[in-house]
Image: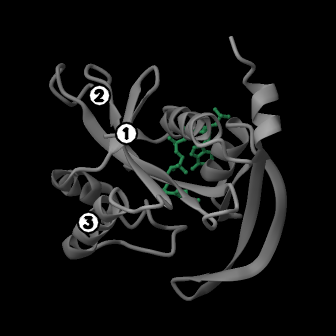
Amino acid sequence: MLRLETERLILREFIYSDWRDVHEYSSDPEVVRFLEWGPNSREETVKFVEGALGCQREHPRMVYEFAVLTRPGIDPLSPPDRSKLIGACGLRFRDQLAEQAEIGYCYNRRFWRSGFATESGKALLRFGFHNLALHRMYATCDSNNQGSARVLENIGMRREGLSKKDKRIRGIWRDTLHFGILQDEWKSLNPLP
Ligand SMILES: CC(C)(COP(=O)(O)OP(=O)(O)OC[C@H]1O[C@@H](n2cnc3c(N)ncnc32)[C@H](O)[C@@H]1OP(=O)(O)O)[C@@H](O)C(=O)NCCC(=O)NCCS
């Protein structure tokens, strides 16, 4: 099982029993406010986790979906020896030959504004550029999703543009911001020790 580690977090592939923790945030209307999916029913959350498990068996691998967990002792409301699943992040290849992938992420509201999305986003870029040798990674977010735009800037992505009213979310046409980073740019921001 793939596993990435950061100072406070563990990113590992999903297991079936994760669905309960995922449902804690995927069913929260505030969490999905800027997203095209949700709030999820229990069945929709289980389907998401089953989809993530299905991706693990793909050849060639087109999608990497990681459960993001705090290391033991980080979440004050969990027993000190336990991890807590706080969200998910992942990358999706544009196509098999493109060497480009889009990243995405979503976190439980209880853990927002603690730097966790930035910390796991950096680990995701390292995985894409270092382990998968990607040429470019990119992301989009709703232009009103200030937190997400800030995460993308924090991890070193450049703002590349804005699409006007290109996504209809819960009946309203929304503007989308586009961000990207090339492997060379990432390397110059993250020189080898
Ligand atoms: C957007 C989201 C991922 C941010 O996660 P987070 O863990 O709070 O992010 P971080 O703690 O790493 O914060 C990064 C920066 O964004 C800022 N930020 C976070 N939420 C913010 C908000 N709602 N409004 C303005 N700024 C915000 C933080 O203060 C921090 O700023 P700094 O770098 O200047 O200190 C989280 O709110 C979330 O999961 N939202 C729901 C799902 C979603 O929108 N996903 C993205 C889809 S494109």
Name the foreground residue: 11 vs 184: 184
Q: Which residue is mark 1?
A: 2
Relative horizontal placement of residue 29, taking residue 129 as reference (left or right): left
Q: Amino acid at mark 2?
A: Asp
Q: Which residue is mark 2?
A: 75
Q: Quadrant of ligand 1?
A: top right
- Residue 133's place in the image compared with 54, above or below, is above
Which circle's residue, 2 or 1, is located before the other in the chain?
A: 1
Q: Position of residue 185 (x, y in %)?
A: 82, 36
Q: Residues within 10 Å of mark 2 (few under 14, many from 20)?
A: some
The residue sitting at 77% across, 46% down in the picture is 181
Percent across and percent down for residue 85 are: 29, 42
In the rendered image, the vertical position of residue 115 relative to residue 148, given as above or below: above
* CA–CA distance in space, label 2 to label 1: 23 Å
> Which residue is depicted at the point 79% across and 74% down?
163
Say if disc 1 is inside 8 Å of ligand 1. no
- List the single residue furthest toward the bottom: 171
Tell me the number on the disc at residue 50.
3
Q: Residues within 10 Å of mark 3 (few under 14, many from 20)?
A: some
Q: Position of residue 66 (x, y in %)?
A: 40, 47
Looking at the rendered structure, the secondary structure element under dot 2 is loop
Nearer the N terminus, badge 1 or badge 3? 1
